[in-house]
Image (spheres, rainbow, N blue to C red):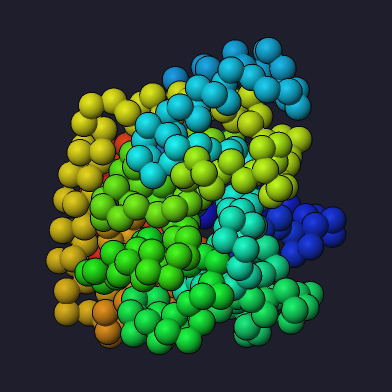
C-alpha cells in the first residue's frame, strides 16, 4: 500500500499541530500506525491522500448512521450554506430539530443545542448541580463524558491510556466532587449512597458503555440506578452522545425502558456537523438562563447548517422500518462473527449496530476487565485489517459501527478479513 503522501503529511502536521492531530486517538499511537489523512468519504468508503480506499467501521465515531455524504442530507446542507453559515440569532431550524428530538426521546420535554458532546455533558452537570443545590457527581469507571476537567476521572476512550487518574493540568480541587464507581456494580452504588446519597447531585453514565469498548449494562442495572436516584432525590443523567439515535430513535433509554431526568445527545443529531444537545424535564431545563440562574451559552449553538443536517438525518431515521432493517443486517453480521471467534481468546460484545472485539479470555462487563484485554494483539489486529483496506476504530477502548450504507457484500468481505486476521494472529 502506497502511503508516501500520508507520511509526508504527518511529518508536516507535527510541525504545526501538537502530535500532528487535533484529537489524540487519531495519532494511532495505541495501535502502532501512522495516521490516515482522508481526502474524501462516500457511503462507507474512505479515500486517503494517496488514493487508498478503506471500508469504514468507525464512521467518525458513530456519527454516520446513514453512511458518509448522504445525498439527501448533502442537498439540504448545500442550500442552507447559500443562506448563510452562522447568525448568532434564532432560526426556525432550531425549533424544528428540537421538536423532532423531543418526539424521539419521551424523557425530553425541552432541549438545548450545543456544539460538542463535552459541552453537552458539562452543561447538563452544571444544570443538575444548580437544580439540586448539591455538588457531588457519581460516574462510572471507563465511562468517558468528554474532556471537561471535573470528568477526567477513571475515564475511558483514549484517556484510558493515561496512567494518572486524571489528565495533567487538572487541579485536584476540580475533581474532588467527582466519584467514580465500578460499572455494573449495584452493591458499590448502594454502599456509596447509604453514606453520601444526600450530597449527590447526579449520577451520570453511558447506559451502554462505548468508551471502554462496547460494554452492556447487566440486567436490572439501569432500573436499579433509576430507583436509587429517585429514593435519594438525585438526578439521573444518561450520556447518549453515542447511543442516542443509534440504538433506536429514542436511544438506549427507549431500548431498556428506563427514563432519565436529563439526557445528552451528540454525534448523529448534527448529521455530520459539530452539534450536540442536552435535554430533559421542563422544570429542570427551565433553570437555564435566560429563564433561570444556571448559565450556558455559545455563539455557534444551534448553527443553521448543523440544524439542517440534523433535521434531514432525523427525517430518514424516522422512516418506517429503518432501525428494524439496520438491526437485522447487524445481527446477521454478529451471528457470523460469533462463529469466527468461537474457541478463541476473543470476546464479542454487541448491541444494535455497535460492537467491539476484546482480545480477552473472559467476558468483559466492566472497565477492569476491558483493561485486562491484550492491547498488543489488538494493535496487530488493527494493522492487519488496515492492510486489508478496512478501517476499524483505532483503540481497544472504542466501539465499531455498522451503517445503512454497509452492503451485504461489504459485510461478508469484512467477515472474511476478520477471520484471516485472527488466524494470522
Residue 386 position, x and y percent, is 46, 59
Image position of 194 with respect to 56: above or below: below
Kindly identify the residue that appears in the image at 15 percent across and 58 percent down. 335
Q: Nearer the viewer, residue 395 or 298?
A: 298
Q: Nearer the viewer, residue 229 or 420?
A: 229
Q: Nearer the viewer, residue 13 or 132?
A: 132
Image position of 105 with respect to 174: above or below: above
Q: Identify the image quadrant of residue 355.
A: bottom left
Residue 298 position, x and y percent, is 73, 40
Image position of 44 with respect to 220: above or below: above
Kindly identify the residue that appears in the image at 59 percent across and 30 percent down. 306
* Residue 199 seen by the camera: yes
Residue 196 position, x and y percent, is 51, 82
In the image: residue 47, left or right of residue 147: left
Number of callouts in the render?
0
In the image: residue 390, left or right of residue 32: left
Image position of 270 with respect to 137: above or below: above
Kindly identify the residue that appears in the image at 84 percent across and 56 percent down. 16
In the image: residue 37, left or right of residue 157: right
Residue 360 position, x and y percent, is 32, 82
Amino acid at each position: 500500500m502506497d502511503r508516501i503522501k500520508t507520511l509526508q503529511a504527518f511529518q508536516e502536521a507535527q510541525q504545526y499541530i501538537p502530535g500532528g492531530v487535533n484529537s489524540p486517538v487519531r495519532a494511532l499511537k495505541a495501535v502502532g500506525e501512522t495516521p490516515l489523512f482522508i481526502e474524501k468519504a462516500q457511503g462507507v468508503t474512505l479515500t486517503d491522500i494517496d488514493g487508498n480506499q478503506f471500508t469504514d467501521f468507525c464512521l467518525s465515531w458513530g456519527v454516520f448512521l446513514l453512511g458518509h455524504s448522504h445525498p439527501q442530507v448533502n442537498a439540504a446542507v448545500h442550500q442552507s450554506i447559500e443562506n448563510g453559515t452562522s447568525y448568532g440569532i434564532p432560526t426556525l431550524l432550531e425549533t424544528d430539530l428540537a421538536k423532532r428530538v423531543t418526539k424521539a426521546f419521551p424523557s425530553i420535554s425541552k432541549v438545548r443545542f450545543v456544539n460538542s458532546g463535552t459541552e453537552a455533558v458539562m452543561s447538563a452537570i452544571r444544570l443538575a448541580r444548580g437544580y439540586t443545590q448539591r455538588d457531588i457527581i457519581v460516574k462510572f469507571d471507563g465511562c468517558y463524558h468528554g474532556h471537561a476537567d471535573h470528568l477526567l476521572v477513571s475515564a475511558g476512550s483514549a484517556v484510558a491510556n493515561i496512567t494518572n487518574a486524571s489528565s495533567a493540568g487538572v487541579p485536584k480541587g476540580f475533581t474532588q466532587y467527582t466519584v467514580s464507581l465500578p460499572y455494573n456494580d449495584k452493591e458499590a452504588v448502594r454502599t456509596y449512597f447509604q453514606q453520601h446519597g444526600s450530597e449527590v447531585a447526579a449520577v451520570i453514565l453511558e447506559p451502554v458503555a462505548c468508551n471502554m469498548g462496547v460494554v452492556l449494562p447487566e440486567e436490572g442495572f439501569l432500573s436499579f440506578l433509576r430507583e436509587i436516584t429517585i429514593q435519594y432525590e438525585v438526578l439521573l443523567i444518561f450520556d447518549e452522545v453515542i447511543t442516542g439515535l443509534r440504538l433506536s430513535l429514542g436511544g438506549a433509554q427507549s431500548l431498556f425502558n428506563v427514563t432519565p431526568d436529563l439526557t445528552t445527545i451528540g454525534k448523529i443529531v448534527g448529521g455530520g456537523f459539530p452539534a450536540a444537545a442536552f435535554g430533559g424535564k421542563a422544570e429542570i431545563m427551565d433553570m437555564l438562563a435566560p429563564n433561570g440562574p444556571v448559565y450556558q451559552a455559545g455563539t455557534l449553538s444551534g448553527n443553521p447548517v448543523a440544524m439542517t443536517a440534523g433535521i434531514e438525518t432525523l427525517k430518514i431515521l424516522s422512516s418506517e422500518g429503518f432501525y428494524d432493517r439496520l438491526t437485522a443486517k447487524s445481527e446477521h453480521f454478529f451471528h457470523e462473527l460469533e462463529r469466527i471467534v468461537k474457541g478463541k481468546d476473543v470476546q464479542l460484545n454487541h448491541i444494535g449496530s455497535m460492537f467491539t472485539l476484546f482480545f480477552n479470555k473472559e467476558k468483559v462487563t466492566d472497565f477492569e476487565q476491558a483493561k485486562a484485554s491484550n492491547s498488543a494483539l489488538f494493535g496487530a489486529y488493527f494493522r492487519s485489517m488496515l492492510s486489508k483496506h478496512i478501517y476499524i476504530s483505532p483503540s481497544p477502548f472504542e466501539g465499531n459501527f455498522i451503517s445503512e450504507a454497509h452492503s451485504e457484500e461489504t459485510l461478508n468481505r469484512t467477515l472474511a478479513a476478520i477471520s484471516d486476521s485472527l488466524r494470522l494472529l
